[in-house]
């Protein structure tokens, strides 16, 4: 039994370390291909500017819709070559606010259209496909409601489409509220790692990478010839990205072009967002990974695609590791502590060291200090552990089902408390807090001191998630009671006296 337990523990750590080695590989690719980033930042100049449609998909975005439409209207581009589509599936006062914003753009001479579908079928993917039927542009830029397009966006990227092979250009996300609290600070670091390391490395190394769902621009023909927007997964952006690249379209990544965005400021909203991304990624892997492995691409491209589509499978392993640590420490005599050390040391150094290098490079690439990443690294590890139950459920749902409801992420915008994300009580996180706390105590009592820091971080992560979700749900109930409302639906709409209610 002891050999089986230690063997399983070793296997889990080995797989997690493999993802760590891959992360280190991405760091090396970034360092190796710096010149390719610089070349991408100087696209060819278009002799004749192409016609562009900007699509703004909305669903109950009253807190940010005015900001989004106003910023889109300030984009520097010839008015006769620009169309703005506001694709609104909202059921609340967002409808009136969006219509007012579109009317204002029209008064300024901008070709803007308010587009509303009969049903919300297909969620965001369905809205984008519906708008594409009447879109006038040969290029299509997309911005989610929590983004603020910058005036120079189009002129900075349209030159890439002089190359007829280019199907999509993705720009980097910036974060307007990265310093709001610990959660937004950690999210910003995690997303910077994705954009400044993963995307840059895949682009520079000739691997497939994905349109991030917003802050990018497509060649319309690339969308249509790749099968269009499909809504059988929750990550329609990843799905279309792989289909387009398998069809031969070239993708460009521009880390120097920034589009500010708003990060979720409460944990319930963040968990809902991460759940959707994880479930959708697994669904896309089910749908396309076999096709990628059979495609006429290089072996290294196939391997990278596997890592790209399966990172969320690490969460069930983290959950399993959290449960295995306690019995492993109890069953292994203190005199055999060196056995655990021999197992843990190289694997933990490999995974944790690669994680540190990954985020340090992301910070340094922005002109920040390496220390700013290192001080937040324990919080990144703890939050990753704390999300494990939520993400594990997402992985299993993604493996067993298609689509599901596209749960929007509430945005703070200019009205704090307008929307609240519902969340189930964190029973799993509370139970795992107790288990990992007992593991921490046991590691000290049995002399397995190398396990102590990780057990403590896991305890902190599960406790952080559990306590914060409980506090947020208590706050949501107080706000609903004060407003005379009953909590229901995907998000809780908190009444604001100054806001008109939709009929």
Image: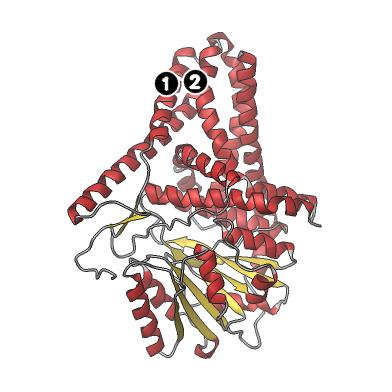
Q: In which quarter of the image is the N terminus?
A: top right
Residue 240: which quarter of the image? bottom right
Q: Residue at x 42, y 19 (%)?
A: 441
Residue 26: image location, x then y, percent: 65, 49
Mark 1 crowdedness (10 Å alpha carbons): few <14, some 14-19, many ≥20: some
Q: Can residue 27 be seen in this view?
A: no
Q: Which residue is drawn at 63% across and 40% down?
A: 19
Residue 427: image location, x then y, percent: 38, 34
Residue in the foreground of this view, choosing between 24 and 187 = 187
Q: Which residue is drawn at 29% across and 60% down?
A: 418
* Element on which disc 1 rests: helix
Residue in the foreground of this view, choosing between 483 and 271 = 483
Q: Mark 1 points at which residue?
A: 438
Q: Which mark is residue 326?
A: 2
Residue 499: which quarter of the image? bottom left
In the displayed structure, 276 sits above or below 320; it is: below
Labels in figure, total: 2
Tags 1 and 2 touching, CB below 8 Å: yes
Residue 149 horizontal side relative to residue 478, left or right: right
Residue 225: image location, x then y, percent: 70, 71
């Amino acid at each position: 039994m002891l050999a089986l337990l230690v063997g399983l523990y070793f296997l889990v750590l080995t797989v997690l370390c493999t993802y760590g080695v891959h992360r280190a590989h991405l760091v090396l690719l970034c360092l190796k291909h710096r010149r390719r980033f610089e070349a991408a930042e100087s696209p060819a100049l278009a002799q004749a500017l192409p016609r562009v449609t900007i699509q703004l998909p909305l669903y109950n975005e009253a807190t940010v819709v005015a900001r989004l439409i106003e910023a889109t209207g300030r984009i520097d581009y010839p008015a006769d070559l620009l169309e703005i589509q506001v694709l609104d599936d909202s059921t609340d006062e967002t409808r009136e606010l969006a219509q007012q914003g579109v009317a204002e753009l029209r008064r300024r001479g901008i070709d803007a259209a308010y587009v509303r579908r009969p049903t919300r079928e297909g969620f965001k993917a369905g809205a984008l496909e519906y708008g594409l039927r009447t879109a006038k542009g040969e290029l299509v830029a997309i911005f989610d409601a929590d983004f603020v397009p910058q005036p120079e966006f189009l002129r900075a990227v349209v030159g890439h489409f002089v190359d007829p092979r280019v199907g999509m250009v993705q720009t980097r996300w910036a974060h307007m509220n990265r310093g709001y609290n610990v959660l937004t600070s950690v999210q910003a670091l995690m997303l910077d790692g994705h954009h400044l390391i993963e995307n840059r490395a895949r682009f520079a190394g000739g691997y497939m990478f994905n349109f991030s769902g917003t802050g990018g621009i497509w060649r319309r023909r690339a969308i249509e010839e790749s099968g269009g927007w499909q809504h059988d997964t929750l990550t329609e952006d990843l799905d279309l990205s792989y289909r387009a690249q398998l069809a031969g379209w070239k993708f460009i990544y521009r880390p120097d072009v920034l589009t500010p965005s708003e990060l979720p400021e409460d944990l319930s909203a963040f968990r809902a967002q991460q759940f959707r991304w994880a479930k959708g990624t697994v669904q896309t892997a089910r749908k396309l990974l076999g096709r990628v492995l059979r495609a006429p691409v290089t072996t290294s491209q196939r391997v990278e695609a596997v890592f790209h589509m399966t990172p969320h499978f690490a969460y069930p392993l983290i959950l399993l590791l959290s449960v295995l640590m306690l019995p492993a420490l109890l069953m292994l005599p203190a005199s055999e502590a060196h056995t655990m050390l021999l197992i843990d040391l190289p694997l933990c150094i490999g995974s944790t060291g690669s994680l540190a290098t990954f985020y340090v490079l992301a910070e340094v690439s922005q002109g920040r200090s390496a220390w700013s990443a290192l001080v937040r690294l324990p919080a990144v590890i703890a939050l990753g552990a704390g999300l494990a139950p939520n993400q594990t459920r997402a992985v299993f749902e993604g493996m067993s089902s298609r689509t599901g409801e596209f749960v929007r992420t509430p945005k703070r915008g200019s009205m704090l408390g307008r929307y609240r994300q519902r969340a189930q009580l964190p029973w799993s996180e509370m139970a795992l807090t107790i288990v990992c706390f007992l593991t921490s105590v046991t590691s000290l009592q049995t002399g397995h001191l190398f396990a102590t820091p990780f057990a403590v971080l896991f305890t902190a992560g599960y406790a952080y998630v559990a306590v914060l979700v409980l506090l947020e749900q208590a706050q949501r109930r107080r706000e609903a009671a004060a407003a005379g409302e009953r909590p229901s639906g995907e998000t809780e709409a908190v009444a604001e006296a100054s806001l008109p209610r939709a009929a």
